[in-house]
Amino acid sequence: MNSAIEELLLELQHLPEAKIQAILEFTRFLAWKSQREGSAKPDEPLLSVAGILSSEPLTAEEIESALYG
């Protein structure tokens, strides 16, 4: 078995059940996230950069001003 897995199992033995449940939920989230990232198609370039830019949403007036001056 992988040494990291063995170490994790040893540490889990010393935690209360509530903490183990939290770890289980987190590992399920990580698995879901990993699967979701792996399913992005490389031929869709917008998906690879989606979410990189984060700012306040623009109002309609700001968009019109940027487009039409």
Image (tube, grey):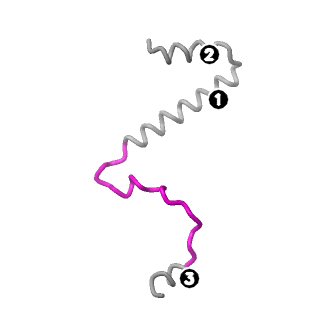
In primary-sequence order, the first of circles 2 and 1 is: 2
Q: Is residue 57 above or below residue 25?
A: below
Q: Amino acid at mark 3?
A: Glu
Question: Which numbered mark, 1 or 3, is in the foreground of this view?
Answer: 3
Question: Disc 3 on helix, strand or loop?
Answer: helix
- Numbered range of the magenta stretch: 39-61
Q: Is residue 46 above or below residue 66?
A: above
Instruction: Verify whether residue 55 appears in magenta.
Output: yes
Q: Amino acid at mark 1?
A: Ala
Side of 7 where 1 appears, left or right: left
* Quadrant of res 27: top right
Side of 16 where 59 appears, left or right: left
Q: CA distance from mark 2 to mark 1?
A: 14 Å
> For the residue carrying disc 1, how many other residues have a C-alpha within 10 Å: few (<14), some (14-19), or many (20+)?
few
In primary-sequence order, the first of circles 1 and 3 is: 1
In primary-sequence order, the first of circles 2 and 3 is: 2
Q: Which residue is mark 1?
A: 22
> For the residue carrying disc 3, how many other residues have a C-alpha within 10 Å: few (<14), some (14-19), or many (20+)?
few
Q: CA distance from mark 1 to mark 3?
A: 45 Å
| Viewer-nearest residue: 11 or 28 | 11
| Viewer-nearest residue: 4 or 30 | 4
Q: Which mark is residue 11?
A: 2
The residue at the point 36 percent across, 47 percent down is 40
